[in-house]
Amino acid sequence: MKQLIFLLLFCGVHLAVFSATPSNVIIIFADDLGYGDLGCYGSPVIRTPNLDRMAAEGLRFTDFYSASEVCTPSRAALLTGRLPIRSGMCGNRRVLFPNSEGGLPAAEITIAEALREKGYATMHIGKWHLGIHAGSRPLDQGFDHSYGLPYSNDMDGRPGLPKGSSGSPTPPQDGWNIALLRDGKVIEQPADQTTLTKRYTGEAVKFIAEKKDGPFFLYMPHTFPHVPMFASPDFKGKSRAGIYGDAVEELDWSVGQVLAALRKEGIAENTLVFFTSDNGPWLIMGDQGGSAGLLKDGKGSTWEGGMRVPGIAWMPGRIKPGVTTQLASTMDLLPTALALADTTTPKDVTLDGTDLAPLLFESKPLPPRPYFYYRGDQLFACRLGEWKAHFQTQTGYGQPKAEPHEPPLLFHLGRDPSEKRNVAAERPEVLAQIQEAVKTHQAGVVPGEPQLK
């Protein structure tokens, strides 16, 4: 046996690869966190030592994308590995509301469902926002247990709530009647939002301790930094960036607690942790809206600031520390998780993501592929390599109608990540290549029944 261990180590093969237990998967999903809101992505005012350490120990993506510019579609895409248009989880209403009739269709196969079939324990902790009706709730979509809010924390405002309260730096704690649910049952209403991050973290640490013998899947979509902004007494008033920074710094603390729990239980080397955000920062909220850094616009738009988000992968001993410029997205997390579980992707299901394992564990480049930027059910832009073409543009909020572009706008994201210099006239051949990729893509898209009604 000693000779075998020596041989494996000599060959540079980490023993965790041969673990009898399939790898655990944790996805931590911030809400409205901007590309420029973390220290490791250049923030000079928000302290994020735990995420900075996670990035230093893992792989930090410079070109990582959410599949949508707003909440509901982005969550549907992450869990299914599919563009929201395929599931019907997009439309003119943009997100689900408490009075919406639809939700994530029961026929969609989520990461949780696929992994549970392989014997994984599954847990959802945080904001759901994929439907409150039978068939679309967490326990209907593959999760053994669920703890958190049914939708965004600014919904269910109490009668008489003053306009603009959500974006206030001092929102009223009793302003929203949103319920905190455990396994679909109300345990607190209204939820005390000042303690949500701490309670989510406690639930996550408990789950890790209970399921340490694995395998398990933990999906942790945080409530913050979505407005109204709250932080616990330990963090409130501590950041240079006001209450927004307080909320992000508490989120960073939470990530640190999760990683520490994995180390404590001795399973860090067998657990893939991925941190990202559902879309860019909600800039119209001012100081409560975060930052997209050097990227243009924010939440609600298909400019880079609306959909390019932080992305950090961590798995000590398996993922080499580094920074990658490879294009990847939240839709890649389903095929990656399934590959780690040694299971195949769902049959007869069109996936838009690809397995990141070769990049994460072998530092191999991913095959070239186009990336499509949708706003609702409309295709607004496409990226191919370093080039991005906009067929129509619209600011995240405040612009009533989209502006079509013929010829499309064209930007080189490597030289111009802020999308300031349109070079369409100089590179018609690039536009032709992108338009051909779009044509092929659209020929294969069958829109699902609209759910955001």
Image (tube, rainbow, N blue to C red):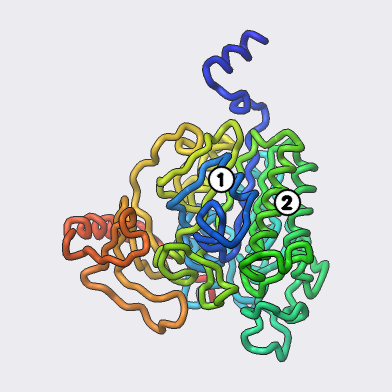
The circle drawn on residue 424 is none
Label pair 1/2, CB-CB below 8 angstroms: no
> Amino acid under label 1?
Ala
Q: In which quarter of the image is the C terminus?
A: bottom right
> Amino acid under label 2?
Asp
At 63% across and 36% down in the image, what residue appears? 23
Left-right relation of 61 to 165: left
Looking at the image, can residue 351 be seen? no
Looking at the image, can residue 175 be seen? yes
Which residue occupies the extreme top position in the image? Answer: 3
At 51% across and 46% down in the image, what residue appears? 60
- In this orientation, which residue lies closer to the viewer: 105 or 291? 291
Q: What element carries label 1?
A: helix
Left-right relation of 150 to 105: right
Query: Considering only vertical position in the picture, is 338 above or below 193?
Result: above
> Which residue is the site of mark 2?
144
- In this orientation, which residue lies closer to the viewer: 417 or 270? 417
Q: Where is residue 114 in the image (x, y as percent from the top left)?
A: 60, 46
At 56% across and 32% down in the image, what residue appears? 318
Q: Nearer the viewer, mark 1 or mark 2?
A: 1
